Image (cartoon, helix red, strand yellow):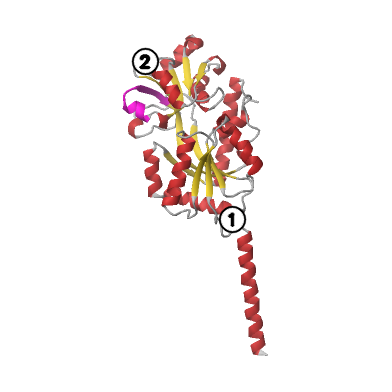
Amino acid sequence: MMKRNVLKTIAAALVLTVSLTACSTAGGGEYPKKPITITAPSGAGGGWDKTARSLAKVLSETKLIEQTMTVENKPGGGGTVFLGEYVAKDSKDPYKLFVSSPPILINNLKKEGNSPYGYKDVTPLAQITKDFGAIAVSVDSKYNDLQSLIDAIKADPKAITLAGGSAPGSMDHLVSVLPAFKSGIDPKTVKYLSYDGGGEAIAALLGNNADAIGTDISSLGSYLKAGKIKILAITSNERLGGDFKDVPTMKELGLDAEFVIWRGVFGPKGLTEDQLAFWDKTLKQLSENETWQKELVANDWASEYRNSADFKTFLEQQEKSVQELLTALGMQK
């Protein structure tokens, strides 16, 4: 009798083990077990592309991800074309991630060229970097501080041309008009020229086809070091270090104009709890890794990690700020 009971106990334990293994596999316990694709919704060489490639490179080099990681580019409509396809086709594929930044909010809120989809249609996995907007002029410009530029815009808005590397209503446009808006100027009166990328906008500035540009400060470092531009202000709450240590913040100039240009990682809406927990753990480890810290320095990026829950809360807050500015521009949908 005792032997029979022992056999029954062993058999029951084996059944339980098999059941737990099956549940673990069904629930994504072995995830990831296939190659992972990270999409940059842009062409090669831009901020999204660099972020996606740095992310894939460091995750692989550090063995935080042992599966093959590839990066693909899907440009079009400032990310709107990709996002529409992603929501329609990949909402349940946990092996397809993508990187984005404030345009995922802006494109969903603006009237022209908008996207019916936004961050609520996908899963925010983590914010991994932060950047800030900046206003810059050529080194020989008569404007040596932000206030003199604002005064000139107040005197005759159409006489001053601001440029950016994105379409009207998009991120560079919002950064460009933010100081004027916070100074009581109707942002609709500010003259803005859009170019296809930050490089073209800077070329317009250096070629005297624009008085100033609004863009992300990380793209301006090489021009500042080469003595080609002056950066009048930045949209951070505190001064940055290094090459930007002498650049004042808009806040210290009396303008409540903080604007964080974050970059983050997103996944499909249909992630399981186990899969989300995996990325929370893995991307936090990435943010603390020395190899990733070196990658940040090489790209003039600042580290800013938020896990999935905190990132989602942050996006809800920034969405309100974007909506306010687009409404003032008459560009909200």
Circles 1, 2 touching at the beta carbon (< 8 Å) = no
**Distance of label 1 from label 2 (alpha carbons):** 55 Å
- Residue 323, compared with residue 32, is above or below; it is above
Is residue 250 visible in the rendered image? The answer is no
- How packed mark 2 is, by other alpha carbons closer than 10 Å (few <14, some 14-19, many 20 or more), is some
Which amino acid, by three-letter code, is at mark 2? Ser
Image: magenta residue range: 221-233
Residue 205, given in percent of the width and then of the height, sits at 41, 19
Residue 223 in magenta? yes
Which amino acid, by three-letter code, is at mark 1? Asp
Mark 1: secondary structure: helix
Q: Is residue 245 left or right of residue 88?
A: left
Please give the residue where the numbered disc 1 appears in the rendered image.
274
Q: Earlier in the sequence, mark 1 or mark 2?
A: 2
Residue 22, given in percent of the width and then of the height, sits at 63, 65
- Of residue 237 and residue 315, the one placed in the foreground of this image is 315
Q: Quadrant of the C terminus?
A: top right
